[in-house]
Structures are given as structure tokens and as C-alpha cells.
């Protein structure tokens, strides 16, 4: 149930971020949002295993395993035995995967900067500060570092 202008603003923000992410993914050659989400999770939890990735993404381990198969075939992810136990798999980004995410983040940032530039100049700092506060409330596994 929607509760007025604040809810509408939050929904508009969600639509904006999704649009920016989808456009940036399309510009990168049509990478799927699921692939990019997995790569982003792996970047923030270097050496994660399949169960950790699956939990962070909210999918079954079998789904994460098939996804990692595709990411490994694309040479974006290394899949190796975990150092502490050979029964687990350790997942890390390759240099190519790291570069892919850097380019994706750069494209998203450029789109969002274009949006922020449309805010009156005397309000931009306040909007950026408010967005930092909002982002700081997100679960740690969903975001990288947030700086004010």
C-alpha cells in the first residue's frame, strides 16, 4: 500500500536505478542483470563459495552453480577448490571480470551523474547527502562501500 509522495518518490528512484542499470548492461553487450548481480556479489565477498553466493542472491545453490558455470565459461570468474577444504569451491573474479564490472559501474555512474546534473545546482549537495544516507541503510552484501 502506498502512503503518499514519499512512497512515489521511492518508487521513482527504484525505477531510475533499474533503468540506469539495464541501459548500462545493454551498452556492455546485453549482459543479464543476474550475471551482473552475481559478479557484484563476488566482488564484495572475494573467495565466496556457492552457498554464500546463492544466499546473497536469494537463489538455490543449483541455480548459482549453473550461473557460475556460465560466468566461468565467459572467463569472468575463477572457480577453484577452497584453501581450507577441498569439498568447497572458492569463487573469485578474474581480471577480465573485474574490468567488466569497472566499466559497468562507470557507465551507471555516468548516467546517474547526468540525472544529478538536472537537479538545481544549489540542491545537488543535499540530494547527494540524502542518497548517501539512504544507501547506508542497505544490507552490506548488496552494496560496496558508501561514502558521504
Image: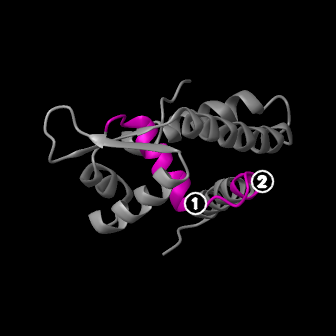
> Does 144 sit above or below residue 18?
above
- Classify 10 Å Cα crowding around label 2: few (below 14), some (14-19), many (20 and above): few
Q: Is residue 139 visible?
A: no
Q: Image point 70% across, 44% down: which residue?
A: 108
Look at mark 2 in the image and give the residue it sits on: 27
Look at mark 1 in the image and give the residue it sits on: 33
Image side of residue 103 versus residue 47, left or right: right
Measuring from the top left, give residue 49's x and y in whole percent.
Answer: 27, 46
- Label 1 element class: helix
- Label 2 element class: helix
Image side of residue 85 versus residue 121, left or right: left
Q: Is residue 57 visible?
A: yes
Q: Which residues are magenta?
A: 24-47
Residue found at the far top of this picture: 148
Looking at the image, tell me whether mark 1 or mark 2 is earlier in sequence order.
2
Kindly report the distance in space between the C-alpha atoms of the residues bearing marks 1 and 2.
12 Å
Amino acid at each position: 500500500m502506498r502512503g503518499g509522495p514519499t512512497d512515489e518518490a521511492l518508487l521513482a528512484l527504484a525505477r531510475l536505478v533499474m533503468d540506469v542499470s539495464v541501459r548500462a548492461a545493454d551498452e556492455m553487450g546485453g549482459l543479464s542483470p543476474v550475471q551482473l548481480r552475481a559478479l557484484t556479489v563476488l566482488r564484495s565477498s572475494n573467495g565466496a563459495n556457492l552457498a554464500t553466493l546463492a544466499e546473497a542472491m536469494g537463489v538455490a545453490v543449483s541455480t548459482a552453480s549453473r550461473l557460475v558455470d556460465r560466468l566461468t565459461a565467459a572467463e569472468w570468474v575463477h572457480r577453484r577448490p577452497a584453501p581450507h577444504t577441498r569439498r568447497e569451491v572458492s569463487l573469485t573474479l578474474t581480471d577480465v571480470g573485474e574490468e567488466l564490472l569497472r566499466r559497468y559501474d562507470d557507465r551507471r555512474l555516468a548516467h546517474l551523474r547526468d540525472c544529478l546534473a538536472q537537479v538545481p545546482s544549489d540542491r545537488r549537495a543535499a540530494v547527494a547527502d540524502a542518497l548517501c544516507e539512504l544507501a547506508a541503510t542497505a544490507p552490506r552484501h548488496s552494496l560496496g562501500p558508501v561514502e558521504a
